[in-house]
Image: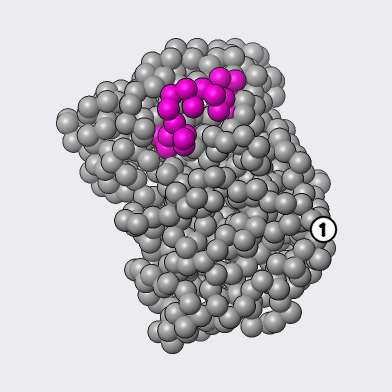
Amino acid sequence: MTFTTRPTLQGTFGMVSSTHWLASQAAMGILERGGNAFDAAVTAGFVLHVVEPHLNGPGGEVPAIVATARDPRPKVLCGQGPAPAGATIAHFRSLGMDLIPGAGPLAAAVPGAVDAWLLLLREHGTLTLAEVLEPAIGYAGAGHPLVGRVGDTVAAVRSLFEEHWPTSAALWLRGGRPPAAGELVTNPAYADTLRRLVEAGQAAGADREAQIEAARRAWSTGFVAEAIDAFSRRPFQDSSGRPHAGLVTGDDLAGYSASWEQPATLDWHGYSVAKTGFWGQGPVLLESLATLDALDDPGAYDPGTAAGVHAQVEALKLAFADREAWYGDGVDVPAKALLSHQYARERAALIGDRASTELRPGRPDGAQPRLPAHVRQGAGRRTDPTDPTTGEPTVQSDGVTRGDTCHVDVVDRWGNMISATPSGGWLQSSPTIPELGFPLGSRLQMFWLEEGLASSLAPGRRPRTTLSPTMVHRDGEPVLACGTPGGDQQDQWQLPFLLRHLVGGQSLQEAIDAPAWHTVSLPGSFYPRDMEPGVLVVEDRLDEGVLAALRAYGHEVRVTDGWSLGRLCAVTRDPATGVLAAGANPRGMQGYACGR
């Protein structure tokens, strides 16, 4: 029997896995009350806003992949807000900027998470808004024991709050100090915001859908939009070192609505793997799987051997180079070519027995790739790197954040399934809006201030987000939902997990617990958009012989703590038996799965 940090849960009623135990149990409570997977996911999403405020918030975003019992085909719920109308390259250039700041009001996209959760509830949920928001209102109003990472995050940006962001200091430095681990912390303003959304809905009458629509209007054109509009006009210090006002207006919120769209998919080893479209980084995983297949080497599928890790890392590098050259919103992405067998063979031919330190985008359909000048000129190469090895959120003293995200997966007894990755709107991303109890996000930092690129900034475009939920189908039925926090590492950590589980036959918890790794040999999506060519970060639980062989391949191996990389959540369903399963990440001692 293989030891795992916790069991792979099994049952037939329902399963939840998320990055915080309170969100998982709150969602499970909704299932117990008769709600379905989508009611439960919405509940978890709003609880995560409260209990993981350093990882996501109402001012952020959420992409999700959904399959219903009635229609098992995967659909993408897009809760990624676009750039506001005033967010032009010319505006940022007029401020003397070459990169969009990583923190502060100027970096905010239009908030998308709340509208997306409410759209999901309206179209696929069964419970009322009051029922699904009850746990979040309770935790925000009465308090919850704070996880230590929140206090650590506040401590890291304490001087910024005290000197420049007084509204954030008022919320997070009560008594003049960061909150302690386990301290009962409340957010009365956010509890009031949620209550007002419920009240706006109830004023619309008894109809459930009408109530949800009324709450959406209160958010997009009512009291929430009014508060955001007014606060966004105030200048605050950002990561450029200077104060600037934001660009999000009430009109931007009024013009935004979450939406449904088709996923990008890859047929692979008898499965169909679904990701968000090429406006996000999700297809990196699909390209990597296709490239590994094109190697025609079974050893390339084993994340526990040096040959397997080498092949997987090199495939990921090639896919991320394509992300930089080709992925973006509102552009003609050669999607079909990027996921074709012919292109996969071309990319696989570039993988040799030496680790590459080059950024090598391909030429799908013979097209010429274009990389940002910042990347071409090597401006992003770190000489004194911040620590990329912790696997936890990395927060600098100026508020710049990397990889701060949550995740939740739910499957119910009827066969409904969802994978969702909420993020953005972190407590350290922007000053707190005092009337609402939350800040805006900083997702605009993923755009380039250069014309003609796949991810150039333009009003109405969605940032090329790192948020990357996954759903896997077999014979047309959903069988697995998974995802992880981690910014640029999200698809890197999901790749070996899927190989271990789907090809290697490991249980969910075995695959989650196994030693993790990732490369930082790619342009970072977060300010200051840096990279470290050839560097491979690995947990020290990987065998010494494997580490030595990876160095022999030419990788610059950076060894970190044995339980520090990866934040995976996963749930599965066997359509033949109805048996459900769940696993959750033990790293950070925060994620949890529950079910029966």
Q: Residue at x 47, y 63 (%)?
A: 533
Please determine whether, in this image, residue 291 is positioned above or below residue 14: below
Please determine whether, in this image, residue 593 is positioned above or below residue 498: above
331 horizontally vs 48: left or right: right
Question: Based on the displayed image, in which of its 4 quarters is residue 192 positioned?
Answer: top left
Magenta residues (range): 82-103
What amino acid is at disc 1? Gly
Q: Nearer the viewer, residue 498 or 108?
A: 108
252 horizontally vs 145: left or right: right
Q: How is the image coloured?
A: one colour
Looking at the rendered structure, the secondary structure element under dot 1 is loop
Q: Provide residue 525's location: percent of width, then percent of height.
A: 51, 47
Name the dominant secondary structure of the magenta segment. loop
Q: Residue at x 51, y 84 (%)?
A: 1
261 horizontally vs 399: left or right: right
Q: Is residue 259 visible?
A: yes
Q: Residue lying farthest left? A: 176
Quadrant location, the C terminus: bottom right
